[in-house]
Image (cartoon, helix red, strand yellow):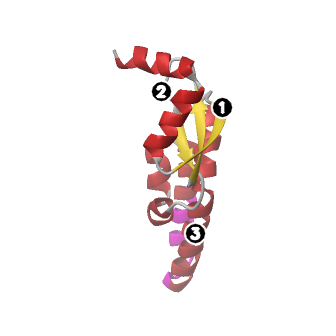
């Protein structure tokens, strides 16, 4: 079972964020953050990466880049949650499910009002 947090905002589809390490965030760093609309962390990570490339020799860049990627993998989902909070989403539930679809199904079971709002958005 995996843990998910459900973030809700009136008039928007619910956003589910998985708990734990993100390999995609580790590999793609600022691009992964930008794809999830975490603009401030993406900009800071890109600036930090650029500063590494501008100021240090290649061996230091490789070690520091690995460490920066690891930190992004560990904290990437938390940066997404922070960005969702800044955009007005409220963390409404913590769910345990095998996958994203099952977590969404559990959310809609717990919150029928979200199901009705989601149906209205899909029309």
Please state the extent of the stretch shown in magenta in the rendering.
47-58
Q: Which mark is residue 70?
A: 3
Q: Is residue 105 magenta?
A: no
Q: Main secondary structure of the magenta part?
A: helix
Q: Residue at x 55, y 45 (%)?
A: 17
Location of residue 88 in the rendering, given as x and y in whole percent from the top left corner: 62, 27
Which class describes the residues within 10 Å of circle 3: few (<14), some (14-19), or many (20+)? some
User: Residue 60 appears at what percent x and percent y?
Assistant: 56, 82
Q: Quadrant of the N terminus?
A: bottom right
Nearer the observer, disc 3 or disc 2?
2
- The quarter holding residue 31 reads bottom left
Mark earlier in primary sequence (3, 2): 2
| C-alpha gap between disc 3 and disc 1 | 28 Å
Say above or below: 37 vs 60: above
- Kindly state the secondary structure of the residue where label 1 is placed: strand
Which residue does the numbered mark 1 point to in the structure image?
92
Q: Is residue 38 left or right of residue 94?
A: left
Q: Nearer the viewer, residue 86 or 43?
A: 86
Q: Is residue 71 left or right of residue 61?
A: right
| Neighbour tally class for label 2: few under 14, some 14-19, many 20 plus, Cα within 10 Å | some
Placement of 76 over or under 49, stated as above or below: above
- The residue labelled by disc 2 is 13
C-alpha gap between disc 3 and disc 2: 30 Å
Label 3 secondary element: helix
* Residue at screen point 45% across, 21% down: 118
Residue occupying the point 51% across, 17% down: 11
């Amino acid at each position: 079972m995996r843990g998910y947090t459900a973030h809700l905002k009136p008039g928007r589809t619910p956003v589910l964020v998985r708990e734990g390490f993100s390999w995609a965030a580790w590999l793609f760093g600022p691009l992964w953050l930008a794809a999830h609309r975490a603009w401030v962390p993406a900009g800071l990570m890109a600036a930090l990466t650029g500063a590494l490339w501008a100021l240090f020799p290649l061996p230091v860049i490789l070690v520091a880049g690995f460490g920066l990627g690891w930190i992004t993998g560990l904290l990437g989902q938390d940066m997404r949650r922070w960005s969702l909070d800044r955009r007005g989403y409220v963390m409404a539930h913590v769910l345990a499910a095998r996958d994203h679809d099952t977590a969404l199904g559990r959310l809609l079971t717990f919150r029928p009002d979200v199901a009705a709002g989601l149906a209205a958005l899909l029309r």
